[in-house]
Image: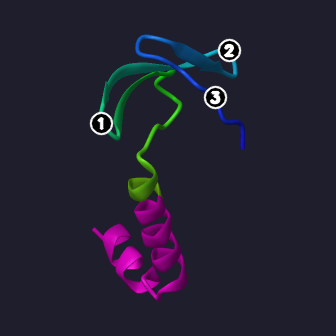
């Protein structure tokens, strides 16, 4: 992990096309602004983990019967 120190209104660039800017600092919270191409998904980690969990559950469960019903219409 790379650890960087940034002040308000300072930024960092990832892969030449993603910019993360410190917008505000209040106590122990930091507000970040993220500029990225539309095709690059950006999620809060807890949302990303929930999506991954739901995807794994969908792949491991026997939902193929329900999926087949969708294509009958």
Q: Nearer the viewer, mark 2 or mark 1?
A: 1
| Residue segment shown in magenta | 49-73
Image position of 58 with respect to 15: above or below: below
Quarter-of-image position of residue 68: bottom left
Q: In what quadrant of the picture does the C terminus appear?
A: bottom left
Residue that mark 1 sits on: 27
Badge number at residue 4? 3
Q: How is the image coloured?
A: rainbow
Q: Nearer the viewer, residue 27 or 54?
A: 27
Other residues around mark 3 within 10 Å, as few (<14) / some (14–19) / many (≥20): few
Q: Nearer the viewer, residue 21 or 7?
A: 7
Quarter-of-image position of residue 13: top right
Does label 2 or label 1 sit earlier along the sequence? 2
Picture coordinates of residue 28 (x, y %)? 34, 41
Image point 46% across, 88% down: which residue?
Answer: 62
- Report the side of 46 relative to 40 (left or right): left
**Separation of residues labelled 2 and 1 (CA atoms):** 31 Å
Residue that mark 2 sits on: 16
Image point 54% across, 83% down: which residue?
Answer: 60
Q: Nearer the viewer, mark 3 or mark 1?
A: 1
Image point 66% across, 35% down: which residue?
Answer: 3
């Amino acid at each position: 992990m790379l650890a960087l120190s940034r002040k308000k209104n300072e930024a960092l660039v990832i892969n030449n096309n993603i910019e993360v800017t410190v917008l505000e600092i209040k106590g122990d919270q930091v507000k970040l602004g993220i500029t990225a191409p539309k095709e690059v998904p950006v999620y809060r980690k807890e949302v990303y983990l929930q999506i991954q969990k739901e995807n794994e559950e969908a792949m491991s469960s026997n939902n193929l019967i329900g999926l087949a019903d969708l294509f009958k219409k």
